[in-house]
């Protein structure tokens, strides 16, 4: 709420220098049936204006509510929209009911934020700081709409730094987009980053946000800073992309971690099935429990294919790295990204950076215009140890990344070298083929085992035979000569002879299911001369894409299970080769460092020391 009142104040003082000129021009034009929203902003020298005779300083003590409502109602339509989405009337009701409205208004009015005292740039920084504090005061949900400034700064640096030389040139015009922009932190930081290098650059922000209050704050921020608020859209990006035809130079996002997409499942699924790769979600769909990869695919769909290309930075949790096996939606999405060579780097961040979660997070950096030395490569940077402790925890945020540490991470990214904390891989290093390894079915049959027989009689399939047939089958099992058969064909033959009739296929399946057990000494079961696989012994192997399936099988499988074979009917849908292609990025595996256990002597000495201390304490108690 404090942020919103401050927003109102920002707007007021942003308009103060031209206030009288705007009122004069309004009086001249108000009866002319003209589009004042296209005329008066030019007079106000802002993208919005206000034609009320009231200010926060003169709304009055007795008619505060009515005068304040008049003041708000006479903003331009784009500014009024911010008030509407912030549900401002509800706040007015609460303050009026507690007799605090006039006091709050006067308190804000007493702060001198005139442009002669506070510059436009400083006003923008103050506005962002209050947004941050508002988010921190509600830290249980802050992560949903506010990304910590240190994370934002790192993300924007990684995305913009490779283009610094271009961005410092003359006549630079670039677009920046955030599909879940929250209060606009990534947009504001991206603009700030470029303007630090080139104050004449023109950066045009675009965004979309689902939360009404966050949307109102983001729109107000754009207004105060002189950007077109029409570029900030309200709605669910996944089900209702309101910028469908736009393509952007830079995309940045911090989508919600691990949030399901059940509410938009139908729309997203329909787009996947109907539009395929002509839509946003062609490669596949992740499980409904986590929509992070949907946002990533959405960002990639916003890439500029020609001219400058597009650079993307997105903050994700660990799930998109490895969730989903070969052929799953998640794996197919990773495959699509890596086989198109769009992924430049992934940076592992320290834990405890966010207000509402302490989980491990990662920044993915992507580009469809990779530099030559990065083509076909992916860089992994382990920055988990680059952090400093917060003086005071803010919810789950106990750590932050310092400016020097941001510079360190950026230098590692720019250097593109192998070190203890930076690894370079081929895009295919993350791929594998999941082959199905079968072993032959070998069954021993126990026709007179009571436990097996009782289990068979409890099976639903047994109930499909009439009582006479059931009794005949049981009698025949009792008449067979052997208590154990190591050959399925001999067992079925013996039962049929005892029965005096052929066994039906359902009867054979029932006997096999309940009377047969795996026995390595038993004969192989065959159908039409081919070995039958044993589903209980079926296994899977992940073969690196860099290795031939046959070579891997001969080295890793055959020496241990000589009778195993590869099921060559399991082939990849895309390349038709044996084995289903999958991709995963097991980040921790590449940076794992073995730490040997401490010597037993050292542990034993510590235990003895603890024992001595306990005995001393006990001695003091008993004295």
Image (spheres, rainbow, N blue to C red):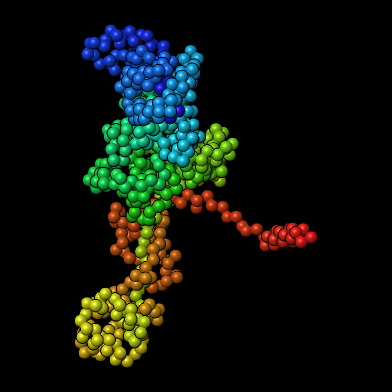
For this rendering, which residue is in front, 459 or 241? 459
What percent of the width, then of the height, locates residue 123? 46, 21
For this rendering, which residue is in front, 421 or 50? 50
- Kindly tell me whether residue 86 is visible in this rendering: no
Question: Within the image, what quadrant is residue 555 found in?
Answer: bottom left
- Kindly tell me whether residue 292 is visible in this rendering: yes
Which residue is painted at 42% across and 69% down in the image? Answer: 558
For this rendering, which residue is in front, 236 or 540? 236
Q: Measured along the vertical axis of the image, is residue 149 above or below residue 550?
A: above
Query: Viewed as shown, does residue 546 lie left or right of 414?
Result: left
What percent of the width, then of the height, locates residue 44? 36, 13
Question: Within the image, what quadrant is residue 206 found in?
Answer: top left
Q: Measured along the vertical axis of the image, is residue 508 above or below residue 336?
A: below
Which residue is painted at 31% across and 47% down in the image? Answer: 262
For this rendering, which residue is in front, 264 or 545? 264
Which quadrant of the figure contains the N terminus? Answer: top left
What percent of the width, then of the height, locates residue 436? 35, 64
Query: Viewed as shown, does residue 382 lie left or right of 451?
Result: right
Which residue is painted at 36% across and 42% down in the image? Answer: 296
């Amino acid at each position: 709420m404090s942020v919103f009142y401050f927003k109102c104040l920002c707007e007021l003082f942003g308009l103060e220098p031209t206030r009288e000129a705007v009122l004069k021009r309004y009086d001249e034009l108000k009866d002319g049936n003209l589009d004042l929203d296209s005329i008066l902003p030019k007079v106000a020298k802002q993208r919005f204006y206000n034609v009320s005779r009231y200010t926060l300083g003169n709304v009055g003590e007795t008619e505060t509510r009515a005068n304040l409502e008049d003041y708000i109602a006479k903003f331009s339509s784009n500014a009024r929209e911010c008030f509407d989405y912030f549900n401002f009337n509800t706040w007015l009701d609460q303050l009026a009911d507690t007799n605090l409205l006039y006091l709050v208004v006067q308190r804000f009015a007493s702060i001198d934020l005139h442009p002669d005292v506070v510059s436009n740039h400083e006003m923008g920084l103050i506005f962002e700081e209050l947004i941050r504090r508002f988010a921190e005061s509600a830290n249980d949900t802050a992560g949903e709409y506010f990304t910590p400034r240190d994370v934002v700064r790192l993300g924007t640096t990684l995305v913009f730094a490779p283009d610094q030389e271009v961005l410092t040139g003359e006549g630079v015009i670039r677009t920046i987009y955030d599909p879940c922009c929250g209060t606009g932190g990534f947009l504001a930081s991206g603009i700030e980053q470029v303007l630090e290098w080139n104050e004449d650059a023109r950066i045009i922000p675009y965004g979309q946000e689902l939360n009404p209050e966050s949307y109102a704050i983001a729109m107000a921020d754009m207004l105060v800073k002189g950007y077109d608020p029409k570029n900030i859209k309200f709605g669910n990006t996944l089900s209702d992309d309101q910028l469908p035809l736009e393509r952007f130079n830079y995309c940045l996002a911090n989508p919600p971690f691990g949030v399901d997409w059940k509410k938009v499942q139908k729309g997203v699924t329909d787009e996947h099935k109907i539009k395929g790769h002509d839509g946003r979600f062609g490669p596949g769909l992740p499980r409904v429990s986590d929509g992070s990869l949907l946002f990533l695919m959405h960002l990639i769909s916003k890439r500029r294919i020609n001219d400058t290309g597009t650079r993307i930075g997105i903050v994700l949790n660990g799930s998109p790295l490895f969730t989903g096996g070969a052929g799953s939606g998640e794996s197919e999405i990773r495959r699509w990204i890596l086989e198109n060579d769009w992924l430049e780097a992934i940076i592992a961040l320290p834990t405890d950076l966010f207000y509402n979660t302490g989980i491990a997070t990662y920044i993915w950096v992507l580009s469809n215009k990779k530099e030559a030395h990065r083509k076909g490569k992916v860089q992994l940077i382990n920055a988990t140890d680059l952090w400093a402790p917060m003086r005071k925890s803010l919810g789950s945020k106990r750590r932050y990344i310092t400016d020097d540490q941001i510079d360190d991470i950026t230098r590692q990214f720019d250097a593109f070298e192998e070190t203890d904390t930076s690894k370079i891989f081929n895009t295919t290093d993350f791929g594998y083929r999941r082959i199905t390894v079968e072993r032959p079915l070998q069954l021993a049959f126990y026709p007179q085992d009571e436990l097996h027989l009782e289990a068979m009689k409890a099976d639903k399939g047994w109930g499909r035979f009439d009582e006479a047939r059931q009794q005949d089958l049981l009698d025949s099992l009792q008449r067979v000569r052997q208590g154990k058969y190591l050959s399925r064909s001999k067992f079925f033959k013996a039962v049929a002879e005892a029965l005096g009739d052929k066994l039906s296929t359902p009867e054979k399946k029932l006997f096999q299911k309940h009377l047969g057990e795996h026995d390595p000494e038993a004969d192989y079961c065959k159908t039409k001369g081919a070995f039958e696989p044993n589903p209980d012994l079926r296994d899977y192997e992940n073969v690196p894409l860099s290795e031939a399936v046959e070579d891997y099988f001969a080295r890793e499988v055959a020496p241990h299970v000589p009778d195993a074979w590869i099921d060559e009917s399991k082939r990849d849908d895309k390349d038709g080769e044996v084995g289903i292609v999958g991709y995963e990025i097991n980040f921790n595996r590449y940076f794992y460092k073995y730490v040997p256990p401490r010597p037993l002597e050292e542990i034993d000495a510590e235990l003895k020391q603890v024992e001595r201390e306990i005995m001393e304490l006990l001695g003091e108690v008993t004295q």
